[in-house]
Image (cartoon, rainbow, N blue to C red):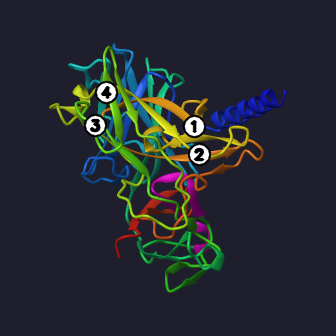
Amino acid sequence: MKNALLLFIGALFIASNLNAQTPYANGVYRHEIKSVEFYNTSKQSSFPIIGLNSTDQVVLGFDDLSGSSRTVNYTIEHCDANWNSSRLSPAEYLQSFTEDRIFDYTYSSGTFQKYTHYEIKLPNQNIAPKLPGNYILKVYENNDPTRLLLTRRLYVVNSKVSIAANVLASNNVALRRTNQKVNFTVQYAGLNVQNPNTDLRVMVMQNTRPETGRLNATPTYVRNNQLVYNDVTINDFAGRNEFRHFDIRTLKLNSERVARIYKDTANTVMLLGDPPRDLPNYTLLYDNDGKFFIYNQDGRDSRTDADYAHVYFSLAANRPPDDGTPYIIGQFNDYKIDENSRMEFDSRGRFYTHLLLKQGVYDYQYIWVSNATKKIDDTLLEGNYFETENEYQLLVYYRPPGSRWEELVGYSLLNTAKP
């Protein structure tokens, strides 16, 4: 009876998490849509931000594993700093058409798993933003916006402020060995700011993860057209740990984290078992801050000749399944906590799962969800250290006097390992 009750409570938790997934967040809404990449064309897997009226572009690429082509449409919608719709007419924020169709698609070649690869670049001659700010890119089929395939968050900046930032140890003595505190100053002399305490807001994200981001609505103090954010209680982030990773750029030989590769009617990759990493001291490991990179080392065009593999993960959490459940997350699954990322407990005392993933390099980590409290803990299994190398994205939002929308007027990328 107890186990049945725990399963019921867990199901309620998952359902509430899924319901919280709105069309204004990164999401994939069909099981056959895989390997969604969305980044600035200057660098693979980079932050999807472009300058307004610049030559910058972002590229969206994804696979449809149904194996056939379909009519795929897309549009973008302007949002505020909280990712709520700005409720503007498309004519107010788009320069040309309100929607377009993706005509660039290619069938896979020489792969066990057949798929169709779709790709677009933005802005283009049909879809281009008129205003700076947050935009949600919606991809759907058959000209029906209710039949969503996926959504991605796009950032369009019109730089009008400068940002100076640094990372220090936490001001809280109890957290100095684990936390990273971000202090920053925004110089806004080029803006018409009537009330600095309400007209400007700053979002700080760690490794492009909105769910752990902090939206700063009020500065610590204002001086000479500068907003200073350095209060001891704000922007204090858990340093966490470096991401785990594995490399399946080739399926012909085992890489560092691969135990075995089986090839029959499909590819199967068995990874080495993962131990918990909540150790007393930090260990330096190279990672990609949660990112993933699609790549086929033995092919010519990874977009269409990289194959898929069933990748098996196992974790020695050293915790009984009655206490909680681990989930596997990373940028590859939008850090989503759902049935697809949930791990099962086996008779050998380990948690396991398998995911269908395209060839490439992947960062990932495990989080723990307690059965008793339903709280999400991303340091219990991974550890938490001030020395961890992290990227921080700082985004400055501004509401012009009398306007009905917020503009993105500043962006800065901060790395804890680089001065």
Gap between marks 1 and 2, in whole Å?
7 Å
Indicate the amino acid at tag 4: Tyr
Please rate how many residues cluster around mark 4, counting C-alpha atoms within 10 Å: few if below 14, some from 14 to 19, many from 20.
many
Q: Is residue 50 visible?
A: yes
Q: Is label 1 in a helix, a strand or a loop?
A: loop
Do callouts 1 and 2 mark residues in contact (Cβ within 8 Å)?
A: yes
Indicate the amino acid at tag 2: Ala
Please rate how many residues cluster around mark 1, counting C-alpha atoms within 10 Å: few if below 14, some from 14 to 19, many from 20.
many
Residue receiving disc 1: 350
Residue receiving disc 4: 118
Q: Quadrant of the N terminus?
A: top right
- Residue 335 point in image, percent of width and height: 52, 43
Gap between marks 4 and 3, in whole Å?
30 Å
- Compared with residue 326, is residue 182 higher up or lower down, i.e. above or below? below
Q: Residue at x 72, y 43 (%)?
A: 323
Mark earlier in primary sequence (1, 2): 2
Gap between marks 2 and 3, in whole Å?
25 Å
Q: Main secondary structure of the magenta part?
A: strand
Residue receiving disc 2: 317
Residue receiving disc 3: 254
In the image shown, does 402 or 177 lie closer to the viewer?
Answer: 177
For residue 193, the mark is: none
Q: Residue at x 53, y 54 (%)?
A: 382
Indicate the amino acid at tag 3: Asn
Gap between marks 1 and 4, in whole Å?
38 Å
Magenta residues span 196-215
- Compared with residue 348, is residue 275 higher up or lower down, i.e. above or below? below
Q: Residue at x 30, y 33 (%)?
A: 359
Indicate the amino acid at tag 1: Arg
Mark earlier in primary sequence (4, 2): 4
